[in-house]
Image (cartoon, rainbow, N blue to C red):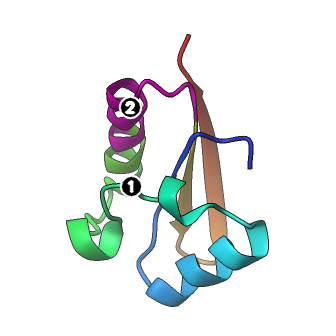
Amino acid sequence: TDFDLIEMNEAFAAQVIACERELKFDRDRLNPNGGGISLGHPIGMSGARIILALAYELRTMGKSLGLATLCISGGQGLAVILERP
């Protein structure tokens, strides 16, 4: 992919595995510090946690382009691209 880092919200491991395979994400770039299963899946603030984690990790690693994804109940989804100068 074109993204340096990807933070994917995952309440279920199977969802991440399916997305990783289908979208051909590099495992080393995906949730570098763990995801919702390991860090917690806070109801109502998952998006804030994921976007903030991505922003900090982009800065820490000196990377510029990141993708944050969220699953939203009812089969919906959302994605945000962050770019650092």
Q: Which residue is mark 2?
A: 61
| Residue 32: mark | 1
Measure the C-alpha gap from mark 2 to mark 1. Answer: 11 Å
Quarter of the image with the C terminus is top right
Q: Which residues are magenta?
A: 52-65
Q: Give the percent coordinates (x, y) of residue 74.
A: 60, 78
- Residue, x 29% and y 69% (percent of image)? 41
CB under 8 Å between discs 2 and 1 = yes
The residue at the point 25 percent across, 64 percent down is: 42
> For residue 49: magenta?
no
| Residue 37, quarter of the rendered image | bottom left
Name the amino acid type tagged 1: Pro
Q: Mark 2 or mark 1: name the one nearer the start of the chain.
A: 1
User: Of 54 and 60, which appears nearest the observer?
Assistant: 60
Helix, strand or loop: magenta stretch: helix
| In the image: residue 70, left or right of residue 59 | right
Q: Residues within 10 Å of mark 2 (few under 14, many from 20)?
A: few
